[in-house]
């Protein structure tokens, strides 16, 4: 039961973070594209500013999501000890 609550809470939090960082699915697709695309290609195509911004949006989203998930796992583990 606790795991289900944590999963539902994660879905709500990740959906909220998704809306804050990417606004819509198109923004997420761009961020994913620039995250995978090598920087040297963006420099050659003179598109480095977009690459920089979208890559850092994706990195920040992944870091925040990972920290939240890690904190929830630690909290759930601490409460399951008792």
Image: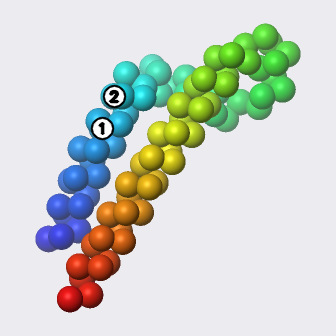
Comparing 13 with 45, the one in front is 13
- The count of marks equals 2
Which residue is located at x 19 percent, y 63 percent? Answer: 4
- For this orientation, the residue located farthest to the left is 1
Q: Is residue 33 visible?
A: no
Q: Secondary structure at mark 1?
A: helix
**64 relative to 23, above or below:** below
33 left or right of 40?
left
The residue under label 2 is: 19
Q: Where is residue 2 drawn, in percent x and y?
A: 18, 70
Comparing 74 with 19, the one in front is 74
1 left or right of 13?
left
Q: Residues within 10 Å of mark 1 (few under 14, many from 20)?
A: few
71 left or right of 47?
left
Q: Where is residue 73 drawn, in percent x and y?
A: 35, 68
Which residue is located at x 53 percent, y 31 percent? Answer: 57
Which residue is located at x 81 percent, y 23 percent? Answer: 41
Which residue is located at x 64 percent, y 17 percent? Answer: 50
Q: Where is residue 15 drawn, in percent x and y?
A: 30, 38
12 left or right of 52?
left
Asked if labels 1 and 2 touch by Cβ distance under 8 angstroms, the answer is yes
What number is the disc on residue 1? none
The residue under label 1 is: 15
């Amino acid at each position: 039961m606790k795991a289900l609550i944590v999963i539902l809470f994660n879905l709500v939090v990740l959906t909220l973070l998704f809306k804050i960082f990417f606004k819509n699915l198109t923004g997420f697709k761009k961020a994913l594209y620039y995250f995978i695309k090598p920087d040297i290609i963006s420099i050659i195509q003179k598109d480095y500013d977009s690459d920089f911004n979208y890559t850092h949006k994706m990195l920040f989203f992944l870091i925040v999501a990972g920290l939240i998930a890690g904190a929830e796992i630690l909290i759930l583990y601490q409460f399951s000890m008792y």
